[in-house]
Image: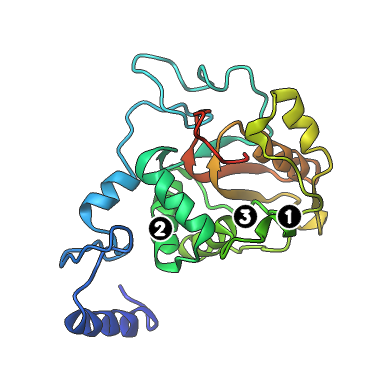
Amino acid sequence: MLNRWQLPKRIFRHVLDGIYPPACVNCLQEDSELDELTRLCHGCREKLSPLRLHICQRCDASVGPHLDTSSDCIHCQNDRFAFDRVLSLGVYDDELRSVIHRLKFHRQAPLASAMAQLLSERIAAEMSSPYDLAVGVPHHWSQRLGRRADSAELLADVISRQLRIPCDRFLLVKSRRTARQATLTPAQRRKNLRAAFRLRDRKHVAGKRILLIDDVLTTGTTANRIAKLLRESGAESIIVAVLARGLGDVRDQTPF
């Protein structure tokens, strides 16, 4: 049942669609049968949230069939994570790569909202109980220069509304600029992020179940560093939710 705020929006949308033919927020092609929640065409929705039958239940990497992935996989078996698990829409490649790049450098609110809706659906399908707080992975202020949007911040804000949980945009701070993680060795990655993040209010996370949100996770070093900080402050559970799971492709330009 629609609430009192959704009904006027839906009426306005139908009127607007009658004046201007609706177009997919991703491919921009006109389509009279867009998905109502995301405003994506059927083809784009399938590409951006593909059905994956074999994934690791810990790091969310795609794996081969007939493997026990309930605890780890070839991609994460040597890693110790402070977070409980990763949830993503798919592999950081092709269409997802293109969309994430657009979200990083252009403020495309309709597309960000569509991607957040897809990720919210994945989170809701996997969550056994509601989470208490949504937090985006922060960037150093100097790393925001040249970008029109902070994709993690946009995603966290929309996901919090869709899942009806609070979002704290100021809880985490990246206090110093760091080198891009993808250029470093595993040991260098850990050293690179040492003391890079801090919490403004440690008491705010005690006993909380937290969604840590970003656009891409590749090595997991950044998410793990933040998760340790949250654990030390008493967080009960931490799920890392990202649009895409990078697997170390040489073309991967993400720092995480």
Residue at x-position 63% and y-position 49%: 210
Provide the residue designation for mark 3: 136
Tell whether label 1 touches label 3 (CB within 8 Å): no
Provide the residue designation for mark 1: 140
Q: Could you tell me if residue 155 is visible in this image?
A: no
For the residue pair 91 and 119, the one nearer the viewer reads as 91
Percent across and percent down for residue 54 are: 36, 26
Q: Earlier in the sequence, mark 3 or mark 2?
A: 2
Provide the residue designation for mark 2: 117
The amino acid on which the numbered mark 1 sits, given as a three-letter code, is His
Residue at the limit of the structure toward the front, as seen here: 146
Q: Could you tell me if residue 65 is visible in this image?
A: yes
In the rendered image, which quarter contains the C terminus? top right
In the rendered image, which quarter contains the N terminus? bottom left
For the residue pair 221 and 97, the one nearer the viewer reads as 97
Crowd tier of the residue under label 1, counting other residues whose Cα lies within 10 Å: few below 14, some 14–19, many 20 or above: some
Residue at x-position 81% and y-position 58%: 201
Tell whether label 2 touches label 1 (CB within 8 Å): no
Q: Is residue 53 left or right of residue 105?
A: left
**Mark pair 3, 1: CA separation:** 13 Å
Residue at x-position 48% and y-position 60%: 163
Q: Is residue 225 left or right of residue 92?
A: right
Q: Earlier in the sequence, mark 1 or mark 2?
A: 2
Q: Is residue 69 left or right of residue 82?
A: left
Tell whether label 2 touches label 3 (CB within 8 Å): no
Q: Secondary structure at mark 1?
A: loop
User: Which circle, 3 or 1, is nearer the viewer?
Assistant: 1
Snapshot quadrant of residue 51: top left
Q: Secondary structure at mark 2?
A: helix
Percent across and percent down for residue 2 are: 32, 75
**Mark pair 1, 2: CA separation:** 26 Å
